Image (cartoon, rainbow, N blue to C red):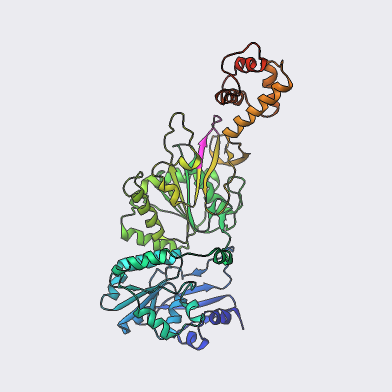
Amino acid sequence: MNRGDLYLKDHGISEEFAKSQGLTWDDNALYIPVKDINEKILFEKTRNLNYTPEGYQPKYKNAPGSSATLFNLHKIRDSPEIVICEGEIDCLKLSQEEFPAVSSTGGTSTFKPEWAEHFEDKRVWVCYDADGAGKIGAERVLKLIPHAREIRLPEGIKDICDYFIAGYTKEDFSSLMEATSLTEEIDVNEIARDMLTLTMKDLYEIKYEKEAFIIDRFLPVAGMTMVSGDSGVGKSWIALDVIRSISDNTLFLDHFAINHPKVPILLIDKENGLRRIQLRSKGMGIINSEDIHIIEHPHKFNLTDEVLLEEVRDLIIEKEIKVVIVDSFVDILIGSENDSADISTVFNTLRSISTEVSWLLLHHESKPVPNFRRSSGDRARGSSNIKAQVDYLFSAQRTKKLKIINIEQGKARDYEKLPKFAIEFLSNGEEVMTGFRYVGEVQDEITKVEEAGEFLLEFIDENPNATIKAIEIGGDARGITKASLKRARDMLIEKQLIESTPDPTNKKRKLFNKLEVSEE
């Protein structure tokens, strides 16, 4: 028995039924014919049986040149009732159980508005997987087909195949169908479902998969990553280094490993023209790859244009895009960046395009407020809902050395935040940007000042007659700058560990107040 046989068996699909639907399989893949409404084969979709979340190969692959369509389309023609489900395998399982069913070949997030007309005169049910992506996909279909009813699978059942494998019968599924509410009547039931609880025992028994990354600790396989920074700090260069490192499988920012090399990338750059992108890419040594796709007319990219968004969905599916880079976030906003509801709309729209890619969003930072230290998570300009919506958030900050910038992480979904680190711009003799050098971790300024304060108290206790020069030399030996010593002195005065007025009877206090060091 090869892996194709085992896959069908694990999903409750008989060999006889699979063959009757035109499926073929071997030890590596399941080959699913996709037909038009008259059952003429349009293309073949492949389910990769070697797929793992940590691997480099895609889970599904559509034939080159194909676009998203409805699988089992002829069932709409033949039946007054239809179930719309999430994938081809669930669709086949329902068909085997004698329930007419269709699904999109484009995945969870793809259901074209024009498909809705196929269901106008039919009784329609929607049954997607019981996870976050399934919920978002089902909501999209329900909005497009208002008379559809939603089937909620029992708690603990992930999808339709799991439902039947768990021992439920076709009669049970029929009962689920008849027990559904109309879409507009769901609100009360929605609240009840959302308020379900887990016991701690239940929580401990759940096996969560480890977060998978394309770029280790920086860019997840699926999700939202944002890099914010002032204009000109180098965000676009960081995005180009993402493209360079993935395309030729070298370290990102001279430090971070690539776990999924050579995956297709889509760049939507509304900040820089094609000529500038070309010059910069050549300088960075980005390889001439057909897996790197650039929107030729990015100014047309508009989140309110449903037709255009559908084209982007189809492009992501056709080219098997795994990373989408948007430069910059402010250029795709719907409404105000300071409005929490508008921000939610933007992110929900991006997720409606695809929840299966890694989004990298470049964004500007807010202006600093005098005497207020912003955390890295507070630097992104606009509503605080931005931080809530993204999975990973980084801030790029200028330093006094113009070619060095600090990167600080403001949010991490499933991991401890990365330590703050510095990178250096590299260029050739003609001042053409060629890449980055990883400088190393950067100690937070607050920690530096506290360390300097501890040094000052300790040093003067041991050396009560020490000169200011001796203090500075001692601090330099510990890697403490003159600026940090001055800030530490001010901090100790504020904490009343020393007095602000020199006391001639107390050498320590007097020495502190004589300490005059210049800012670096």
Position of residue 70 relative to residue 191, above or below, is below
Task: In the rendered view, tell whether residue 192 sits above or below residue 479.
Answer: below
**Extreme residue toward the right, this view:** 462
Residue projecting furthest to the left: 121
Quarter of the figure that contains the C terminus:
top right
Q: Quadrant of residue 192?
A: bottom left
Give the residue drawn at x 34%, y 75%: 180
Locate residue 466, reporting x and y percent.
71, 17
Using the rendered view, name the quadrant where residue 436 is placed.
top right
From this viewpoint, which residue is outermost toward the bottom? Answer: 16
Query: For the point 66% across and 18% down, which residue is it?
Result: 508
Residue 159, compared with residue 200, is above or below; it is below
Is residue 29 in the magenta section?
A: no
Relative placement, left or right, of 292 versus 79 is: right
Tally the marks. 0
Q: Which residues are magenta?
A: 395-403
Q: Quadrant of the N terminus?
A: bottom right
Any part of residue 111 in sight: no
Left/right of residue 434 with respect to residue 85 in the rendered view? right
> Percent x, y for residue 350?
40, 56
Most foreground residue, 78 or 265? 78
Q: Is 180 positioned to the left or the right of 415 in the image?
A: left
Q: Quadrant for residue 182, please give it.
A: bottom left
Tell which of 403 and 295 is nearer to you.
403
The percent position of residue 433, horizontal first and vertical second, equals 54, 39
Q: Nearer the viewer, residue 365 or 49?
A: 365
Q: Is residue 402 magenta?
A: yes
Evaluate whether residue 139 shows in this view: yes
- Position of residue 347 measured from the top left corner of the image (x, y, whole percent): 39, 54
